[in-house]
Amino acid sequence: MRPLSILPVLLFSAGSALAQQTPIVHDGEYEFLRAQFGKVWDTQDAEIDARLAEIRSANDGQPPNFLYILIDDVSFGQMGDRKMNYVMGIETPQINQLATEGLSLMRMYTEPSCTPTRTAMLTGRHPVRAGVEEVKVALVGEGLPASEVTLAEILKEVGYNTAHIGKWHQGDIEQSYPHNQGFDWAAFPLHQQVQLSLMTTEAMRANNMLGYTPEGQNNQFLLDERFKPFGLVAGVEGSTGGPASEIDMSAGEVWTQAKYEDMNLRYQQQALEQLERVAAEDAPFFLQYWPLYPLNFVYPDQALSRNGGFHADKLQLLDGWIGDLLVKLDQTGEADNTIVILMADNGLMYHYEGTSGLNQLIYRGGKTQHLEGGVRTDAFIRWPNVIEPNSAAGDIFHVSDIFTTMARIAGATDHIPRDRVIDGIDQTALLLNGEGNGRRDYVYVYEGPVLRSVVKQEFKMHLPAPGQPGAAAPTYNIYRDPREEHPLVGYSLWAGASFQDMVKRHQKMIAKYPHSEIGKGLPYDGIDNLRPETELTREVFMSWQ
Amino acid sequence: MRPLSILPVLLFSAGSALAQQTPIVHDGEYEFLRAQFGKVWDTQDAEIDARLAEIRSANDGQPPNFLYILIDDVSFGQMGDRKMNYVMGIETPQINQLATEGLSLMRMYTEPSCTPTRTAMLTGRHPVRAGVEEVKVALVGEGLPASEVTLAEILKEVGYNTAHIGKWHQGDIEQSYPHNQGFDWAAFPLHQQVQLSLMTTEAMRANNMLGYTPEGQNNQFLLDERFKPFGLVAGVEGSTGGPASEIDMSAGEVWTQAKYEDMNLRYQQQALEQLERVAAEDAPFFLQYWPLYPLNFVYPDQALSRNGGFHADKLQLLDGWIGDLLVKLDQTGEADNTIVILMADNGLMYHYEGTSGLNQLIYRGGKTQHLEGGVRTDAFIRWPNVIEPNSAAGDIFHVSDIFTTMARIAGATDHIPRDRVIDGIDQTALLLNGEGNGRRDYVYVYEGPVLRSVVKQEFKMHLPAPGQPGAAAPTYNIYRDPREEHPLVGYSLWAGASFQDMVKRHQKMIAKYPHSEIGKGLPYDGIDNLRPETELTREVFMSWQ
């Protein structure tokens, strides 16, 4: 939802120099850095403004387009790198190629799970500030609140066309839907892949789910036939100002693996169509493609990869699709003026590794965890003639920085709200000037509402449990000990006090700008064609609210 | 030592077609593959012979030079790849560049330790066949037997100039010295880096050895002042037919970190000098450079790397040196006709990871172990205008294959002895025709004399302990489970019998061609300037023999 603007209209397309008159509210740690580097950054910012103006004037006065591809649950190293391709027997030639055409962000930190990472990118804030944790698969009547200001909303303020295709996972209430959060048009599933891929009849009979479906075992004590998701809405489409409509299912129909495959294919097709549509317009575009693949839980009939696993095969398939999308971008003639970002939202859910092929690689841990394996992801940014091809940066980046950086590049910084903490840092300097020009050397790592780790430079402290002394908090050197297995007394006791200061600064800002509440509402409101079984499910949900 | 030739002289420079009249004795598993692919390989071999003849005739009738750089104890992924460089904070730009100029062997298997890997490369045989295990740091009176035929020896047969610089670690007896094993000239330390780097006064006072040196603690019960290596020979130089001379130490001198650094610098300098010397000759050359670095156990005064560890810094230093050597190769004008192989001998000794920075990365385990972390190493081969730049191959390669492949390329296959098992496979097809043309899909993995694992395709069985049933042997899928942590009942019971067959074939060949004995002799014979303290150490050693 669009924020109430507090700035005069004539500032809307002005550069960031004016915006600095009303500074963005950043976290204490950033202000600590700003106190050390503010002057250097101000000088650099003046140069950056000039460069951005140059780029715009070479493009009929318009800022660049923005194509953002966010891939679900992929371990750091699984895409974009030949060595790791060979390790796992999964080939990602198209993504590798994209990596060689742009900048590889070698220390991209996300949140450890789907919903929070996506919220952080959309709002520029740690999701805990918006009351958002993980959104579950079944009905919750919750989601991204209307009061949050998304990147789509602020880009719309400066004239962008916007569209979202694929996974959304920001809640099942009307205010949370993408077409109510700044996207002109959106096609998305209401929930996520647990329902869509794991709860198909086929998946329930497959090895990984054996015994779950009643026909698969003789369980005379089974009562609840709706323990598996029942009657949930699958995929919908909608435009700003209109309702959403479910398009996958008719009344009484059973969700199958074939329908999941069709849904994935359709999103790919719609990504191509939407790209063609927005590229044909005069205005710049922000197109967001968040595929459901590689998540999938049924083995294919014929393996695409040497690995042969369900994850591996869908990642290879998706790699080809991304290649197709980039070819389409070339065909539109807009490639040179489009920033493409491709990244994963968090690590793999490795907890069932071995059998599943969902494996830890370099880093320990995975999705749901504050360990590097949970929150370090591959990330590549291509911006022809601006970002140096085949470059890489070891600077720390957090997914919320995409919000602030893209706002800057689009000339929309003034539309970032000033009444709340924005965690995202403007990293335009890193994009334009390359490695060593990053503006953060820290990350706070949450698991849901709990601050679990603090990263500073090459050190990472796992915070002690409540009531435990700071000296009980192990500290790791991520370069020397990437798997976070060997805390050192030297690090912990030397840096411990400094880490505690960082936590205090962070908490102080939370006290000053308290967290908002998650959005609440009636699940599925704003969908105009609910099936009878969906109505039934909703009634049951309401009965115990 | 040169073998008694059993072939007429006129065959010496003939192609392999003639050599096939007396086939090399390969292991049973290879014959099993040959039964399936022999015809295809014969056809391909005829093409390869034609191509090799072409290459020679374009070079005044001479086969290519061969520069072999073997780096000590480096984890798979630590060099040659940007992503992993960033993970560990260690930059290897020169080796990365070499990787982009040639073929990356993505499944190079070595033996799990220094001595055996080097024996395998030199002889084309699993070292157990020659009675060679790990050669210890102190006196042993043992080493690579004269009866083994090294790659240097067979390349000399077809006219190569040969030189060896750096680590050797094939024993402390005269017959084992490199200048008695086919190298015209050699500069090498008699032992390895435990003595040379870890047992310096400085290292003993450093954090990692704190308390070892008597001055570092108050140990009133200390009796044996010679528990640390005492009076051992450090570095020697020698030429074929002559004695070796110790050059580092004078009588009564104490070995220091500064002397270790000087030794490393000297080997680098000598590698440059020898390259210049042999390149100026008419004959082709085989130059072997086996640096002692990155092994080192004292922190530098000033860190070179973001990692800052002793291993990391020396790896970066060495990377620069390798760049210098490759520049020198360019300057000689011989680069286009020189095959450069760079690889590591085995994984890191990760057993002290964390504090040391010697860490596991992708694969589990390290040096001394049959796990992938012990025996998978980075390996790059550059051969301008023959090997496709920036190519990679997922085919399995074993370090012993270098012996057989280089023999083939040099036209020296006929000089490979026919009276013993040669484990090395001719992989020329892979080098010339690229990925998918490898001729092995298996490796036997030894720890010393014990067969510990069998690798076949993507599967790896950890063999059961003696007396345990085969069903107790876990089998892993290396693509899906690179860390070998999740054996699957399906793999183990399905492939178990086939793995047992592989072991039987291997044992049958051992019964037919029994292992030789390790070479034995008086330590340090053939060195003409032993110090008095060295004589003393030798006398003590002899007193209990």
Image: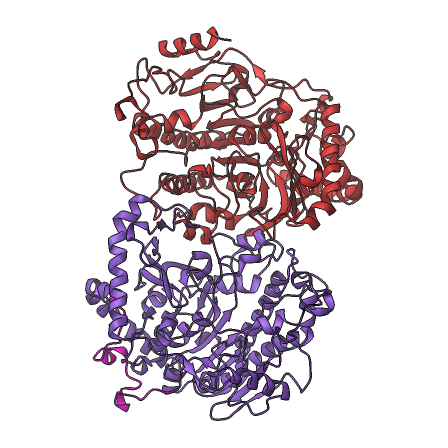
Chain colours: A red, B purple
Q: Residue B300: x, y in percent?
A: 69, 64
Main secondary structure type of the part rendered in magenta: loop
Q: Residue at x 59, y 80 (%)?
A: B232
Give the image location of residue B131, x and y in percent. Answer: 38, 75
Residue A307, image x and y in percent? Answer: 35, 47
Closer to us: B24 or A49:
B24
Of residues B67 and B177, the one drawn nearer to the viewer in this rendering: B177
In this picture, residue A416 sits left or right of residue B38: right
**Magenta stretch holds residue B18:** yes
x, y percentage for residue B117? 44, 70
Give above or below for B123 relative to A543.
below
Res A283 visible:
no
Q: Nearer the viewer, residue A311 or B444?
A: B444
Q: Which stretch appears magenta? A: B1-28
Q: Which of the 4 image quadrants contains residue B285?
A: bottom left
Tell me: A309 left or right of B24.
right
User: Image quarter for residue B504?
Assistant: bottom left
Q: Quadrant of the N terminus of chain A?
A: top right
